Image (tube, coloured by chain):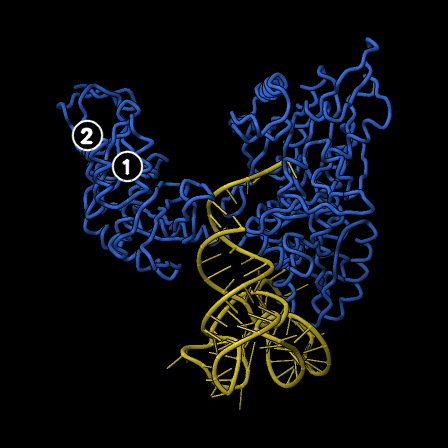
Amino acid sequence: MILTFPDGSQREFAQNSTGFEIAKSISNRLAKEALGIFVDEVRYDLSRPIKNDAKIRIVTFEEEAGKEIFWHSSAHLMAEAVELLYPGTKFGVGPAIENGFYYDMDLPEGVKLTNEDLPRIEAKMLELAQQGNTFQRVEIDWKDAVEFFKEDGDPYKIELLEGLKDDEITLYKQGTFTDLCRGTHVPSTSVIKAIKLLNISAAYWKGDSERQMLTRIYGVTFPKKQMLDDYLIMKEEAEKRDHRKLGKELELFMITPNVGAGLPVWLPKGAFIRRKLESFIKDELVKRGYVEVITPHIGNLNLYKTSGHYPYYSDSQFAPIKVEDEEYLLKPMNCPHHHQIYSSKPRSYRDLPLRLAEFGTVYRYEQSGELNGLTRVRGFTQDDAHIYCTHDQLKDEIRNAVELTQLVFTTFGMEVTTRLSFRDDKPDKYAGTDEMWEQSERELKEVADEMELKYHIGLGEASFYGPKIDFIVRDAIGRKWQLGTVQVDYVMPERFGLEYTGSDNQKHRPVIIHRAPFGSMERFMSILIEHFAGNFPFWLAPTQAMILPISDAQIEFADKLSKDFKAKGFRTEVDARSEKINRKIAESEQQKVPISLIIGQKEVDSNSVSVRIHGKGNIGVKSVDEITSLFYDLDKPESTFYNFD
RNA sequence: GCUGAUGUAGCUCAGCUGGCAGAGCACUUCCUUGGUAAGGAAGAGGUCACGGGUUCAAGUCCCGUCAUCAGCUCCA
């Protein structure tokens, strides 16, 4: 048979040659590193005979598919270890994930695992890996498979089989462990050289909170020990960026049960950065024709009954406040308030688009288990705006809103993924007519295509009143969070009876765009802190420069310098303690102050400063005029990534 | 909300099998006046998350509550 390689070259192989033999014929090294083989885009085990002419591609750990095979096989290995250590364990599913794998299992009565048990399982896995057991693929009848797992006493596998009646069933066997699995697997457990089990937690069977809670163990493995070491170092570095840790160290915010879970309190430095971000956006709003409004933190419950938020989201709202026969809700959304502003007077098509903006604080009763630093809270501020426009204006307005959101991410150099959040086929989740949905999804997609956004479509991710374009970022430890959002809404204009008078002197419904480039200030701050690892650029830093006199003799000069800088609008402090200069520098660096200005007698005599850039070091002496002009250059968003070289 | 772990000084953490509450950093005072990442000494600082229980005796064991962390479920 003729096999075609990825580079287009062809070679003849005996029929029923295996991937392993093919790899071996290329090089011994490839044979050692190969984990699987694509045969006409279908993944094969290396030991599986290839029957016909095909396009093939050998897979190693270097690529995603290789990692997937490797980690999925590792999940089987872990299951084998657990089954040996805790006989009677029943197994759910054990997939590869982005950075490793997990396996969900139902441990025998009375067995409770904690993180302390992980090294023991790791050791067992390593022992089994070293045995070099092969993964054997067994094709089997559906009935025989059910029979097998009945005997094995594993109800979860039988349930999985129920969903696979029409499929070809395969089992994989390595050592003493046999699993229902479609594969692919590594040739032998011996390729797994380094193992780290990361944590142990719980997960519902099939993700259904009504069903059995299973024990889930997460782990990661590598073909080389060094790769694990690198991974662990990276992970440690990432944890250092955690905004909860930095928020405390840099005194940015605090969360205390005395105020309430999920209700962050902003300390002076964090509040400063947040205000700075707000004014960054406000400058853009002026340029883009928005007008600012201010609305109260609570609103009549009827407002939310009209909008439909109340029935849809009553579970995640704070209970209504009853005052003199009226009920009020801590506002979970700003939109109904803004709609009142729209409808406060007759609107003409000449008034549109009307763009109402507000940093509006909203309150949602998130489940206690969901709360997480600043990324998931119960009170947060949206950089919200509602754009009321005509159909003709809609696409332009969506485009403008998306551009503003992109400006935010490019300014800070953040990597985002874009998702078109559309509805799924569960009609009770959504309001509005099919026509409205089809139209608004089409329009969103058209804009996304015209702007050449790279996006994926998230079915079922829409809000109840319309589809959205969401911008999603990752935090330091890889968790994904939605930040910016642009949403199309045909439903609220109906519900609130919003109208404008057209050029035809007839009444028409406007369309609404909900949009928030940062999303929530709290969540954005959390991501920003992690993104910069606390090293805020000059224009955002609460203290921009720390002035460090070497001895008491220079304090007077330092104070005068600081006063002059402050008069120019810069944020400088003087460290006048009787500490050695090394100490002062160390602390200024630890506080991640962008610039330290060291003042000795030489600098006083020559009206200059010795300049030290955070994370870079000493860049030499500059005159006071030079440093002032550098400060002016640095003090704007465009200088976020200023290069000091 | 669910499962599990954790909660000791402002911070980071030790405290064994129940027997006087500990360290480093930070803080205060004093000494030191220095050239690019932590000078020295002394002092002060605690309802061991909260509530209950067992015990002669509880930071330590048991129960409950709250909070935090990990994951699941949810997220306008």
Q: Nearer the viewer, residue A4 or A446?
A: A446
Image quadrant occupied by the C terminus of chain A: top right
A218 versus A604 height, above or below: above
Identify the residue shown where x is 54% and y is 33%: A417
Q: Which mark is residue A142?
A: none
Label 2–label 1 contact, CB within 8 A: no
Q: Amino acid at mark 1?
A: Cys
Image quadrant occupied by the N terminus of chain A: top left
| Disc 2 crowd, CA 10 A, few/some/many (<14, 14-19, 20+) | some
Task: Name the colour assigned to chain A in the rendering.
Answer: blue
A467 left or right of A16 in image: right
Identify the residue shown where x is 76% and y is 28%: A288
Figure chain in yellow: B
| Quarter location, residue A507 | top right
Q: Nearer the viewer, residue A460 or A81?
A: A460
Residue A29 place in picture, x, y as percent? 23, 39
Task: Return the residue at label 2.
Answer: A22
State whether discs 2 and 1 lie on one chain: yes
**Chain at tag 1:** A
